Image (cartoon, helix red, strand yellow):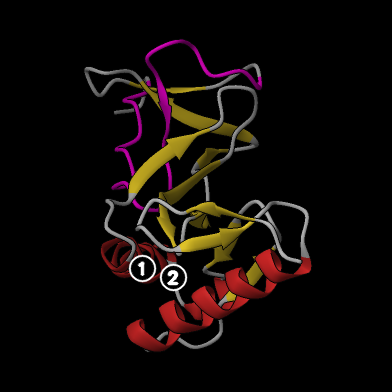
Amino acid sequence: MTMTTAAPAGGAMPVVGQIATTTAAMRAAAALIESTAIAGLSVICDDSQISIQVGEHLGDAASRAALVTRLAAAIGTTAVRADSPASPAAWVRADGAISGLPVRVFTTVDIQHSGSLPLACDPAGNTASAATPALPAGWRWLTSLDPVPAPAPGPEA
């Protein structure tokens, strides 16, 4: 006997921890991929979440962000840019749901550097090299999606 719970869309969804739940997640992910006609995605389905990665082999950061945006629309949400506060890492992601299971779609984006130091900017757009791996509150990492900042004038400028 299979136990079910009511899914948000009004259907029945198997209880977490069951093979049927993972199978349903895989079918939902396949339907999403088919509806968006995006090949080459990396998909992980378990009984609690569907994770879809748009890998670097699918293009540059802007192309991959556009694919995340397309997948986000298909799951009824919006793609957003996210930064790690603990280390120089950033991604574009969308969190939604299909078939009663949470879905996370994401792609990583490269951080810009000045020499060996990652670049970050404050809310006013001021750019600085991050001397520590932590991102100051309110700041964000400069990524390959951002314009390359102009070099700071030096004594020879």
Disc 1 marks a residue whose amino acid type is Leu
Q: Which residue is mark 2?
A: 60
Q: Residues within 10 Å of mark 1 (few under 14, many from 20)?
A: many
For mark 1, what is the residue?
71
Residue 21 in which image quadrant = bottom right
Image quarter hosting the C terminus: top left
Q: Is residue 94 left or right of residue 28?
A: left
Query: In this orientation, does residue 25 appear?
Result: yes
- Lateral position of residue 101 relative to residue 20, left or right: left
Residue 17: percent from the left, percent from the top? 77, 54
Mark 1 or mark 2, whichever is nearer to me: 1
First of labels 1, 2 by sequence position:
2
Magenta stretch: helix, strand or loop mostly: loop
**Other-residue count near label 2 (Cα within 10 Å), few / some / many at <14 / 14–19 / ≥20:** some
Q: Which numbered disc covers residue 139?
A: none
Q: Residue at x 77, y 68 (%)?
A: 19
Secondary element type, mark 1: helix
Choose between 9 and 35: the one closer to the eye: 9
Residue occupying image coordinates x 35% and y 34%: 151
Q: Is residue 46 above or below residue 55?
A: above
From the viewer's perspective, is residue 5 above or below residue 66? above
| Residue 114 percent location from the top left of the image | 52, 36
Name the residue at 37% across, 19% down.
155
Q: Residue furthest top?
A: 137
- Give 123 or 1, whichever is nearer the viewer: 1
**What amino acid is found at the position of numbered circle 2 in the picture?**
Asp
Q: Is residue 25 above or below residue 125?
A: below
Q: Nearer the viewer, residue 130 or 78?
A: 78
Query: Could you tell me which residue is drawn at 53 percent across and 40 percent down?
Result: 113
Report the magenta residues as a range: 133-154
